[in-house]
Image: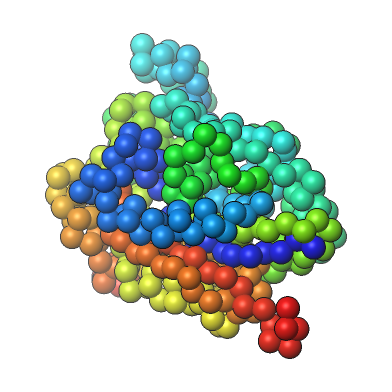
Amino acid sequence: MARITAGVGSSHVPLLGVAHDQNKESDAYFAPIFAGYEWTRNWEKAAKPDVVILVYNDHASAFDMKVIPTFAIGCGERYKPADEGWGPRQVPDVIGHPDLAWHIAQSLILDEFDMTIINEMDVDHGLTVPLSMMFGRVEQWPCRVIPLAVNVVTYPPPSGNRCWALGEAIGRAVASFPEDISVQMWGTGGMSHQLQGPRAGLINAAWDNNFLDGLIGESDDLRRIQHIEYLRETGSEGIEMVMWLIMRGALGPATRLLHRHYHVPCSNTAIGHIVLEPIAPSSSGA
Amino acid sequence: MFTAARARQGYHLNQFAMSLMKPENRERWKADEKTYLDQWPLSDEQKAAVLARDYNRMLDLGGNIYFLSKIFSTDGLSFVQAVSTMSGMTVTDYQAMMNAGGRSPEGLRSKKEQR
């Protein structure tokens, strides 16, 4: 049976893609950011997941205002890096896993999550920056990737509780896939940032770190945070953090911390990163 | 905040900005901004705000920051450069604020708290 073996949370700031692509990772500004991903790059080489389900948001690249899906799952064979206005990133194409993706899509819809199914799209920095952060410079990405796009651009985004519940449903879907493969769940975006208006540049390190704390262990308090709290405490774009809750929900009732990183600033934002593994329920002994 | 009301009001403004994703459209836009803009059913206020690069005004008129980013990217500006213009700060002062840990949420959580 397929298993969810770990969860990864990370910011997906486009500037990190620029720094990576232009070999600036060791510049004074970027070094403390990338230093926090060294542990993860080494760990991923040993972990060797077969598939990553990558929760992210599109930033007016594949989707425009014509169609705005709340939850969309990529069931295609492959995805090209998007041209976001300065040419596509020179990173490998993203190879999908249509069998598992279709299995998850069917399972979720029958589980009452009304997913949008995507067979063709380009993927922007929201998806390719986390891949670069976790895998570094590679000829091809070391695993298959299932994109899971969430609308956090046009209000209202889905609630934190709904995101957590979707994660739980993805966990059930993966567990019922017959192949014996290792699946990681990544949630991306955040942390505190506001990209607009007079309050631009808002950073709330205390709140961000409480959020990271809340992902660890047995608590599910984070699923009850309301949109208004994200907006007030973490800025208008801090709402992206609901995507981390899909990752957390998929890990099951309890998690153990493997690695954690936080740094300000990166562009207009606070960088956050966490690696978690699910703790199997003690009664099963599995 | 990009509410449903703003999404309705700003639909064509955002779709115009999105059109700048295509290199051939960027060339036409750079060659003659006004003529390019007149092909889109924007209000006069929206057109004036775009031509003046008044991002706060564009937000008020229904612009969404991720769509508006196509305009400043076409101008060769980074997110930090463009975003700082909305906060009434110089780019240098804004960057210094970010390097010092960013803008504190104290007193800025809501309009009520600002009074």
Q: Position of residue A207 (x, y in %)?
A: 37, 73
Q: Position of residue B72 (x, y in %)?
A: 34, 32
Which residue is at 37% across, 64% downward? A261
In the visual, does B54 lie left or right of A49? left
Q: Can you say whether A275 is above or below B97 in the image?
A: below
Which residue is at 31% across, 44% downward? A25
Viewer-nearest residue: A264 or A5:
A5
Q: Position of residue B25 (x, y in %)?
A: 47, 17
In the visual, does A123 lie left or right of A166? left
Q: Can you say whether A81 is above or below B3 in the image?
A: above
Q: Can you say whether A209 is above or below A195 in the image?
A: below
Please identify the quarter of the rendering in which residue A166 is found: bottom right
Quadrant of the snapshot with the N terminus of chain B: bottom left
In the visual, does A102 lie left or right of A200? right
Which residue is at 44% across, 72% downward? A212
Q: Is residue A43 visible?
A: yes
Q: Is residue B17 visible?
A: no
Viewer-nearest residue: A72 or A70:
A72
How many discs appear? 0
Please identify the quarter of the rendering in which residue B49 is found: top left
In the visual, does A243 lie left or right of B36? right
Please identify the quarter of the rendering in which residue A285 is found: bottom right
